[in-house]
Amino acid sequence: CDHPDSKYEASMKKKAKNIAGVVKKPFCYGNSYAALLVIQEAPGPQLRQHGGDIAQRIAENKEFTACLKTHIEDFEFKEVELDNKVEQSDSTQEQDMGEDHIFGWNQDKLELLEGPYPLKQPKSPSGESWIARAPSWAVFRVVSW
């Protein structure tokens, strides 16, 4: 969310409610709904280090995940922190522009076997710095469908 710190909490709650509405929306072939949810760009290292007071608190306490849990009660959730150090043009210091990824799954449908884990950022063939999103992965087994 690109909101002033004062509006960050309300924005987070609205986003969690909207995501839950999509996850719980029945598919056209029955009453089943999504079994897996993966959210990138969740509040993470960048906000923990450089956000305003409210954004830092939300990222540090993983309040976005807690908010999702209140709307999607039958899902299990796990986060993974992804660092993404970027050299700042105005200094020699690197700033962590990382994010958290949130994996949510219905335990009646899926079993988490591994992860979630951050993946290593690939090296650029030209030697340029990394400018893309940090990747993550997890392994699930289908329990029932």
Image: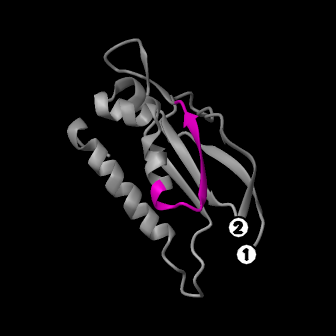
Dot 2 or dot 1, earlier in sequence: 2
Identify the mark at residue 57; answer none if there is no mark. Answer: none
Q: Secondary structure at mark 2?
A: loop
Q: Of residues 84 and 33, which is closer to you in this image?
A: 33
How far from the left and from the top, in percent, is residue 81? 56, 35
Q: Residue at x 46, y 56 (%)?
A: 70
Above or below, 66 against 71 in this view is above
Residue carrying label 2: 109
Residue 59 figure quarter: top left
Residue 61 figure quarter: top left
Above or below, 21 against 128 in this view is below
Q: Residue at x 48, y 75 (%)?
A: 25
How far from the left and from the top, in percent, is residue 68? 47, 54
- The extreme top residue here reads 92
Q: Residue at x 59, y 55 (%)?
A: 104
Q: Residues within 10 Å of mark 1 (few under 14, many from 20)?
A: few
Q: Is residue 59 left or right of residue 32?
A: left
Q: Secondary structure at mark 1?
A: loop
